[in-house]
């Protein structure tokens, strides 16, 4: 045996000997006919009768976008333009403006939000980039229009999609984060691992969330990790 | 700023001639185990000395143009001294690098674990009450807090108590807005209004954790330099109302250029995206204005995107528009000018605008003179508004000495450069002469470019009587309404060229955006008009100018670099461009 043959990456395979029955090909023919007969006698259709019958899409399906509303019915988007930055197809165009004075919790809102559904490649990066979970992709897939302009979805149209889909169990409001800015709702966020290593005795390492702002939270944070 | 240390130490000293330890001794300091040599009379602090070796000591409150307060504590470093016997004695405490002078034998350690721990602690403290609203903050992307948090900070906050959030200020000035909650109290803005504008509108009110920046009631921050506090602010507390929420800064592309609004010629950066200018920011240039720029320049670029700009060239015959096609207009204009110059060369005149770049003036002058050496060249009107406005000022608005910033009365960028070109060609007419004899003129080539208008109605009326009127401008005027040829030019952001400021500093302007459809950069128009082949190249023209005009000898390299070159009367470059040290 040479040194090369010892190499585990190389396996030498011998061609198997062909016996008498195999040489006649009869067992293989019988096996094939059995499959054919099984399909003829036990018929199960796989064709879906679309559009009479709608498909049930997987939960992670990425369809038409929606712009979520907050509890007060306002557009949740804070016009940070991170979705437009993340978008590989450059299909999002936002014009930001200072929020109206009636919105004391906001600095900025989208005066115009236009998403080109034709240009979009439905990758879902906008959803991932959004710091306030304002943009989400729904299960709507049958998008039609009579002109290109009709499929340039503006802010109102995207909010309409939210109103249409918010009660659909397949398009739940996945939002965890409400608003941004002063004292954002970090308290209700699940714990995210800190980017830097924590020393074992660090009090904050045992906190349920980073940057917790919860003066009335039950004070079991000081308990030692088991 | 990258500063290059030249090896100027004599060889005898470098080879360690122990016999004369003090002879040829250059003062040296040691930063992070690297030696730097200090020049005669040089006064550096630790931050500047570290910049010499390309090491950044993080800092917020320190700014090279402002006084030192050492209040942010971000630049804490270990400092010691090297004794003559070679031993090093370190101070036990960390000291602020901005406040500690570096002298012969100073040892600075800025990367030890002790320093890093201090930086982390300082940043954590600065971020305690910061709202962390980066997604909606205009500064995100060029924010000192963001940058240093990534480089020196920790990844999470240990604060378990509610943040101390101060309400934003409703109004502190016409151009600036203050988000009080984002402020880290570095007081750069306060020191700027005290030391540069002298107007002292901004101040720190209250103490301790209630400390915030504010103005006196009824005295908003509206001085002519107010926009600079936005650039000075290392975080997103002070924002420009003009730029607020317009763009995310990471989408902007910067181009180095020169502010055209007065003859100071501040070095600037034009920030644009998709052929739309969003803001101008000052670029540090010790040879021109220093670190800052005035609000007239900062916000005086809106005309670039004005609706009424000339966006197509025109050829008229008997008052009727014949064509709007560049390909027809350039050859027909060449023919018309040649004919006029052949018929009566002494009755041909051209008016050069002080808004032209040197290169454009040179191409036009040499082209017209090639048609006929008798072609009369005149400098157009130089708009002067009031008197030079110097800063700092006192409480009553009276200028103080020493002057730290000047907004010049001469409201055009290149009067000096165009005059130098015209002097070379022997300018034999003044604007007044041309206007007075306009009705007898066979041909008049008038270049405008001043967006705020450059012709009196009377002058326009007189000039339009010339037999052949050519106007090259960016806005329609009484003259362009009647001219035989109208050439739609470009604004300063759409052109390549150079401006010479009041003291003879030539700096490059660079094309940042494309001109609106149908308008062309003036350089390209003149390049084609003068029958040159290929594409317009400002550098090629500069090399040509250096050979033809002694005063522009410094243009020989083609490029003028980031800081520009100073031309003196005799043309030789007065000073080679060296990175000057801020005093």
Image (cartoon, coloured by chain):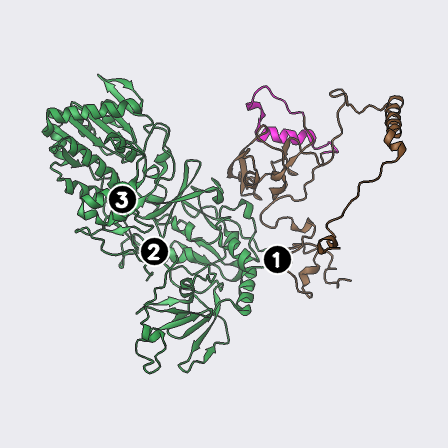
Chain colours: A brown, B green
State the image coordinates of residue B571 (x, y, percent, origin top left).
19, 50
Question: Can the viewer see residue B18 in this picture?
Answer: yes
Answer with mark 1 or mark 2, whichever residue precedes in sequence: 1
SS for dot 2: loop
Judged by depth in the image, the label closer to the viewer, 3 or 1, is 3
At x 20% / y 30%, what residue is drawn? Answer: B445
State the image coordinates of residue B416 (x, y, percent, origin top left).
21, 45
Judged by depth in the image, the label closer to the viewer, 2 or 3, is 3
Residue linked to disc 2: B196
Whether residues under marks 3 and 1 lie with C-beta atoms below 8 angstroms apart, the answer is no
Above/below status of B314 relative to A198: above
Above/below status of B455 relative to B133: above
Residue linked to disc 3: B499
State the image coordinates of residue B308 (x, y, percent, origin top left).
34, 28
Is residue B544 found left or right of A149 in the rendered image? left
Q: Nearer the viewer, residue B365 or B301?
A: B365
In the image, which residues are magenta? Answer: A142-170
Q: Quadrant of residue B54?
A: bottom left
- Using the numbered discs, state the Cα–Cα distance from disc 3 to disc 1 in whole angstroms: 50 Å
Judged by depth in the image, the label closer to the viewer, 1 or 2, is 1
Q: Quadrant of residue B86?
A: bottom left
Above/below status of B328 relative to A103: above
| Label 1: chain letter | B
Answer with mark 3 or mark 1, whichever residue precedes in sequence: 1
| Crowd around label 2: few <14 · some 14–19 · many ≥20 (10 Å) | many
| Crowd around label 3: few <14 · some 14–19 · many ≥20 (10 Å) | many
Q: Are marks 2 and 3 on the same chain?
A: yes
- Using the numbered discs, state the Cα–Cα distance from disc 1 to disc 2 in whole angstroms: 37 Å
Whether residues under marks 2 and 3 lie with C-beta atoms below 8 angstroms apart, the answer is no
State the image coordinates of residue B50 (x, y, percent, origin top left).
43, 64
Answer with mark 2 or mark 3, whichever residue precedes in sequence: 2
Is residue B213 found left or right of B153 in the rendered image? left
């Amino acid at each position: 045996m040479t040194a090369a043959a010892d190499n585990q990456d190389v396996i030498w395979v011998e061609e198997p000997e062909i016996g008498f029955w195999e040489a006649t090909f009869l067992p293989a023919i019988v096996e094939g006919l059995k499959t054919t007969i099984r399909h003829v006698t036990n018929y199960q259709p796989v064709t879906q009768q679309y559009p009479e019958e709608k498909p049930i899409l997987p939960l992670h399906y990425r369809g038409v976008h929606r712009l979520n509303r907050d509890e007060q019915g306002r557009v949740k988007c804070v016009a940070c333009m991170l979705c437009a930055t993340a978008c590989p197809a450059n299909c999002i165009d936002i014009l930001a403006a200072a929020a109206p004075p009636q919105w004391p919790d906001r600095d900025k809102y989208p005066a115009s939000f236009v998403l080109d559904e034709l240009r979009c490649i439905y990758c879902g990066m906008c959803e991932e980039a959004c710091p306030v979970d304002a943009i989400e992709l729904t299960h709507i897939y049958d998008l039609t229009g009579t002109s290109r302009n009709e499929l340039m979805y503006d802010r109102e149209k995207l909010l309409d999609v939210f109103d249409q889909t918010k009660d659909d169990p397949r398009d739940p409001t996945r939002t965890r984060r409400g608003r941004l800015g002063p004292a954002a709702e970090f308290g209700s966020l699940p714990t995210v691992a800190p980017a830097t290593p924590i020393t074992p005795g660090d009090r904050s390492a045992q906190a349920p969330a980073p940057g917790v702002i919860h003066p009335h939270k039950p004070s079991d944070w000081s308990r030692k990790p088991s | 700023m990258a500063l290059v240390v030249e090896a100027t130490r004599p060889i005898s000293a470098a080879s360690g001639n122990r016999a004369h330890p003090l002879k040829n001794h250059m003062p040296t300091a040691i930063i992070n185990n690297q030696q730097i040599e200090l020049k005669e009379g040089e006064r550096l602090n630790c931050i500047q000395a570290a910049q010499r070796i390309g090491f950044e000591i993080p800092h917020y409150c320190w700014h090279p143009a402002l006084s030192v307060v050492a209040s942010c504590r971000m630049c804490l470093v270990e400092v010691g001294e090297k004794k003559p016997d070679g031993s090093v004695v370190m101070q036990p405490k960390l000291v602020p690098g901005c406040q500690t002078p570096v002298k012969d034998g100073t040892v600075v350690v800025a990367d030890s674990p002790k320093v890093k721990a201090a930086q982390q602690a300082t940043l954590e403290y600065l971020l305690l009450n910061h709202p962390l609203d980066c997604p909606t903050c205009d500064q995100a992307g060029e924010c000192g807090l963001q940058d240093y948090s990534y480089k020196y900070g920790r990844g999470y906050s240990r604060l378990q108590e509610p943040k101390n959030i101060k309400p934003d200020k409703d109004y502190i000035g016409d151009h600036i807005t203050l988000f009080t909650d984002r402020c880290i109290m570095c007081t750069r803005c306060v020191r700027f209004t005290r030391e540069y504008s002298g107007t002292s509108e901004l101040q720190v009110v209250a103490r301790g954790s209630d400390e915030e920046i504010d103005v006196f009631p009824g005295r908003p921050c509206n001085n002519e330099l107010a926009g600079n506090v936005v650039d000075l602010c290392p975080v997103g507390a002070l924002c420009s109302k003009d730029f607020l929420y317009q763009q995310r800064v990471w989408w902007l592309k910067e181009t180095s250029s020169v502010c055209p609004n007065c003859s100071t010629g501040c070095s600037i950066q034009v920030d644009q995206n998709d052929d739309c200018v969003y803001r101008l920011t000052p670029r540090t240039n010790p040879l021109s204005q220093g670190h800052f720029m005035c609000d007239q320049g900062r916000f005086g670029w809106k005309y670039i995107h004005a609706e009424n700009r000339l966006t197509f060239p025109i050829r008229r015959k008997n008052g009727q528009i014949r064509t709007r096609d560049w390909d027809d207009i350039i050859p027909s204009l060449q023919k018309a000018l040649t004919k006029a110059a052949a018929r009566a060369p002494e009755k041909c005149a051209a008016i050069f605008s002080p808004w032209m770049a040197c290169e454009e003036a040179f191409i036009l002058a040499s082209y017209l003179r090639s048609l006929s050496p008798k072609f009369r060249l005149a400098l157009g009107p130089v708009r002067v508004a009031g008197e030079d406005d110097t800063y700092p000022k006192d409480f009553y608005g009276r200028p103080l000495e020493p002057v730290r910033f000047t907004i010049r009365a001469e409201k055009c960028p290149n009067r000096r450069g165009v005059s130098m070109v015209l002097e070379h060609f022997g300018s034999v007419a003044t604007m007044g002469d041309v206007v007075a004899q306009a009705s007898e003129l066979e041909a008049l080539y008038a270049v405008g470019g001043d967006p705020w208008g450059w012709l009196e109605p009377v002058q326009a009326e007189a000039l339009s009587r010339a037999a052949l009127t050519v106007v090259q401008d960016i806005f329609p005027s009484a003259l362009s309404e009647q001219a035989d040829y109208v050439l739609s030019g470009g604004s300063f952001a759409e052109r390549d060229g150079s401006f010479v400021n009041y003291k003879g500093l030539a700096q490059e302007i660079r094309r940042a955006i494309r001109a609106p459809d149908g308008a062309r950069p003036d350089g390209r128009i003149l390049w084609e008009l003068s029958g040159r082949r290929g594409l317009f190249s400002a550098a090629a023209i500069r090399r040509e100018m250096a050979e033809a005009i002694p005063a522009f000898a410094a243009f020989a390299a083609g490029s003028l670099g980031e800081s520009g070159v100073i031309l003196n009367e005799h043309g030789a470059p007065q000073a080679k461009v060296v990175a000057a040290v801020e005093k």
